[in-house]
Image (cartoon, grey):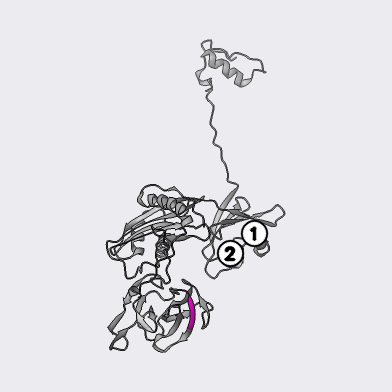
Amino acid sequence: MFRRNPRIPRFPRFPAAVGILGAAALFSTSGEWPWARLDDTPIALPIVVTDPYKVVSDTLKSGETIGALLSRQGVIGLDLSGLADALSFDPRRLRAGLVFAVRRDAISDTPTQIDVRPDDQQRLRFIRTSAGSWEGSAIPIRWTTDTMRLAGEISTSLVEAFDREMSEATLDRNERMKAAYALADVNAWSIDFSRDVQPGDRFATVVERLVSEDGEVRFGRVLASDLHINGRQITAYRYTPATGKSAFYDEEGKALRRAFLAAPVEFRHVSSGFSNRRFHPVLGIYRKHEGIDYAANSGTPVRAAGNGTVIRAGRAGGYGNLVEIRHRDGITTRYAHLRGFGAGIRAGVGVTQGQVIGQVGMTGTATGPHLHYEFRVNGVARDPRSVKFEAGEPLDRSDRPAFEAQRQLLATLLQRGGAPAPAPLLAD
């Protein structure tokens, strides 16, 4: 018969209702059974959370249709054409490079939502309903506006200066180039940026800076500029007269706009200037060069230097494709070696200053793409820089107090460096 060893403590009996955990708790308080003690610290169990969806980005390729992209993503039943009118967009104008964000169910891998931004103003969102159809909505993109001062020294060109001075800013190169060209446009009546700029010249400008809710940065309007070019200082201030539209004025309230642009093509560089004796690179002889040659990439837009009427648009011997415009006061301008003509440009058509009349090319007697530009007064070729034009129209006396107040504000911003400031309210 088995006998219990009296040296081993007897395991106490407990009512069944107490249970094993209750007994263990008693032992833990008595201290007789350390191995039975329970830790009363809460146990942090791992929680596994599975995302209900995943997002896949897909880019519309060059030459690819929207339907092909949707098919690749397994999207069924989405008719963009049927939703286009309600959302005010044209599916045929969605350009290559657009990114479609496709939200997919993590379990079934079924597309449930598609987001795409056709432009800077709105985001299109398409959501799959429980019935399997698709609904669309246009979500406006919020942009905030402040002002930004850009300044620097010019070494070779305005484009180079903008690219160098703002390379560290949160602005991509396209935006920097847009800012450079916008500044040139403001001063297009005063400065030929392909001929007048010298190393060491300086620029400062105040522009609107637009920041989207996604953190993107864009440039808006130029508000003011201060240029020191080849010994001259040219200032410009944006102002909207009481009865008119926004324009730029100097410190005395005179409009910068003149009868003719300083240059009819976006600035690159002058490959050959006005000369009474120039060696012709094709003909191999010395002869007069009665115009200015602007070297530029083929296809660069060529603009009418002033208001006028087209008197010729077509082939003209060594000129190649030529547009000739008659202006007032006996002035005519010629634009030669064009690759093609602007929309609707033909003899007898009126054009306005800055209107695109053609594109840079190398038709006729030309060794490379450039614009040959002639400025004639009563049939005699003249260097445009030697012709004196009337000063711009001054502001009306009634506008002067408001203009002066705005000019002082913009002048302060032009001189101030540092952080961006709230944008002054300048109406268009």
Residue 371, position as x, y percentages in the image: 39, 78
Residue type marked 1? Leu
Q: Reading the chain from its start, which is encountered first: label 1 or label 2? A: 2
- Is residue 15 placed above or below 54 in the rendered structure? above
Q: Which residue lies under the disc numbered 1?
A: 87
Residue type marked 2? Leu
Residue 93, position as x, y percentages in the image: 58, 67
Q: What is the magenta range?
A: 307-311
Q: Which residue lies under the disc numbered 2?
A: 69
How crowded is the residue under tag 1: few (<14 C-alpha within 10 Å), some, or many (20+)?
A: some
The reply to whether residue 169 is visible in this rendering is no
Counting every numbered tag in the picture gives 2
Quadrant of the frame with the N terminus: top right
Viewer-nearest residue: 312 or 89: 312
Q: Is residue 289 left or right of residue 206?
A: left
- Quarter of the image for residue 82 reads bottom right
